Image (cartoon, grey):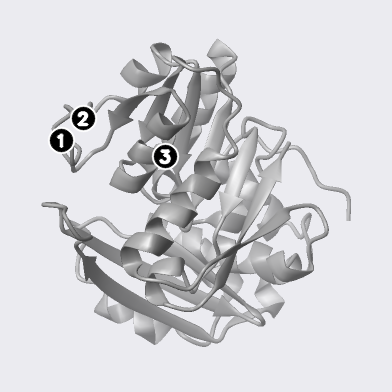
Amino acid sequence: MIERTVRTVRGLVDDVLAGARGPSPAGLVATSVFRLTHGTRLAGSSTTYRNRYVLVRVGRAFGAASVAADTPDPDGWCDASGSPVEVLLRDECEPLRIAALDAYLAAVRPFRDDPVPERVLLPDGTPEERAVARDAAVAGLLDVRPGARVALIGVVNPLVAAIRDRGAECLPCDLDLRTTHWGDVVARDAAEVIDAADAVVATGMTLANGTFDAIVDRCRDRGVPLTVYAQTGAAVARAFLGSGVDALSAEPFPFSQFSAEPTALYRYRS
């Protein structure tokens, strides 16, 4: 199937509902819908990450989306297991829609079978070792000169370090964190850091909180390259390669932080 150019997440959902990206989602079942809560604090850090996800399984693929702390209690999501994917794509809850969209796109085009990306195997190791390896792989997608300013939208401390290790200046932005591990002030306004940046890295969480389209538009307008690091919505972000997204580190579920064994991520360049 020829990949269609997409401009917005809503447009991508509409494509899928219309059967333009594969089989009709009305005929596919979300076998399992569940939530996962995960907390971690890396050695030497004062930051405890509290991550919440909704996950959807369609066939051989999982889709995932992060869930904000103030999202109403999603106990009812488990009852969505067995629903047609189409029903979930029309749900009012944005994280659930993104997880269903992610699962659909990953089922239609599994990462493991995709000949396009570079497959990067993260080594076995401690959480700290695996986080450093993962974020070094993400930073490796950046084509920046020493001294370049890189906006990081969605702060992950090892990724801040990986950007700096490449000789670049990190401009952190996050809706929840106020400072980095090193005490750097974290901006809340994505437009502010994009306008000051030579390159942008955004996490897939921007898909779940509804800010992704605005970030892509701002980067397009400024001609700034955008790299996406996606656990949330990895297959969704893939659909934007060459249409606002210049590079992607796609890490489908189960994520690296849930295993001490080698796991893969997939690096794409448009």
Which residue carries the number 1 mark? Answer: 179
Say which element carries label 2. Answer: loop
Q: Position of residue 100 (x, y in %)?
A: 53, 67
Q: Is residue 185 visible?
A: yes
- Badge 3, how many Cα within 10 Å: few under 14, some, many 20+? many
In this view, the residue in front, 72 or 212, is: 212
Which residue carries the number 3 mark? Answer: 162
In this view, the residue in front, 141 or 270, is: 141
Separation (CA) of disc 1 from disc 2:
5 Å
Which residue carries the number 2 mark? Answer: 186
The kind of residue on which mark 1 rests is Thr
Residue 177 figure quarter: top left
Q: Is residue 24 visible?
A: no
Q: Sequence-wise, which precedes: disc 1 or disc 2?
A: 1
Q: Position of residue 92 (x, y in %)?
A: 39, 58
Q: Sequence-wise, which precedes: disc 3 or disc 1?
A: 3
The kind of residue on which mark 3 rests is Ala
